[in-house]
Image: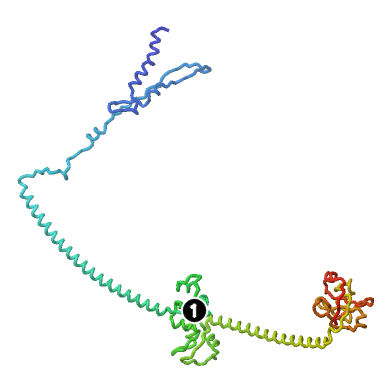
Amino acid sequence: MSRKYILLFLFPFLLEPLTAKSAVDCKAVTGTVTQCNPYSFKFLKAKKVKYDKGRQKLIVDKTLPLPPKPTTKVISVVDMIEEYVKIEEPIRYRGVEEIPLESDSTEKVKKQDFSLASEMSSRREALIEKMEKIYKEQEIKRVEGLKLAEELENKRLEELKLKEEETAREVGVYVIESGDSLSGIAEMFSMKTSELRKINDLKKDASIKIAKKLVIPYAQERIDIIAKAEYVIKTGDDIDSIAQDFNLTAIEIMKFNKVKKGSKIRVGQTLRLPLPYKLAQEARKKKLLAKAAKLAKTKKVYKSRSARYKEKLRNKRAKNKKMLKGFGKKKLRVTATAYSSHHSQTDKTPFLAAWNNRIRPGMKIIAVSRDMLTRYGLRNGSKVKIGGLSGYYTVRDKMNKRYRKRIDIYMGVNRRKALRWGRRSVTLYY
């Protein structure tokens, strides 16, 4: 290829950067630029690549076509203000500059000023008269309002005073007596204990003393009636009205006072009121009286039983004394063993002794050999004393005929105690 064709081929590529540099980007437009290029320089250098079928070789290389150049005119802010905004001179504030007037209109202006001044003065006088009238009316209303307020305040104070007097009449005191409790006083006047404590500014654990006064929200006359549970009949009273006043029924009052139906009541007569707390007191009193009567009866029975027992004991002692009148004059040295109520030591009837005597544990009895019955003068029921042992023992059983000068001491059902006793030589006094 000749140099001529090579230069023709390379000419468009050499011309592209020159044309691109002359085109300005639209993002960087200034006041002196009238045209811009929406595509940046890098887009102008983009390549469009094509490949032949079945080949990997580049066959086409060319740039994108330039877009049409828009004609954009840039106008500055100063130019826009000068063209579209109209600025006029200020009218209100001109400083000390005099306003020129026509010479032929001066008198007319003076007349207008005089008429305006007179009109303004007349209006001002009318306004002052109107304001004075309004002030007078307001002063009159204020004085009337003060009088009305004073009257209302006096009326309120009178009502408050009357209310305090009524409250004072409806509040009384109760003097604490012996045996009273805070809960009992509250029950007496049909109140809650907490309510009574709150009225009298008492703490929960506060104690009350005799002769101390408690405030009760009732009239003093009613407090005295409820405390005594008695009502003195006045003129015009009847049982129905009294019952209604104290939340009772006429039948209850008549039954409590043992008044027959149809009986007349007289002025000055005292009626006992069956109030709930009074009925509870009566019930407790009856219960205590019944308990005391029962206790007295029991004591009386106990005393009679005790007297009978003492008499029986005296008789027994006298009998024993008579029987033991010559006791202790005889003594005998014998061999003493012990036995208990067991089949191995007795027979099939361990609690049945000789002479059909019934025995039980705890009894001080002995069994003796037969020679002591025939030779030494002992018999059924004889009282003896064993040396070394306290108390007196009674002969209630007899031993086998093979034993001589022997006694057997009864140990109840305590077999170990009988074995521990073993065999001892003791002196027998009878």
| Closer-to-camera residue (165/38) | 165
| Closer-to-camera residue (176/345) | 345
**Residue at 9% across, 55% down:** 115
Binning the other alpha carbons within 10 Å of mark 1 as few (below 14), some (14 to 19) or many (20 upward) gives few
Residue 397 image-quadrant placement: bottom right
**Residue at 90% across, 84% down:** 377
Q: Quadrant of the N terminus?
A: top left
Asked which secondary structure carries label 1, the reply is loop
Q: Amino acid at mark 1?
A: Ile
**Residue at 13% across, 61% down:** 125
Count all numbered tags in the image, as a single digit. Answer: 1
Q: Position of residue 256 (x, y in %)?
A: 55, 87
Q: Position of residue 269 (x, y in %)?
A: 48, 91
**Position above or below: 177 against 417:** below
The residue that disc 1 covers is: 210
**Position above or below: 140 against 277:** above
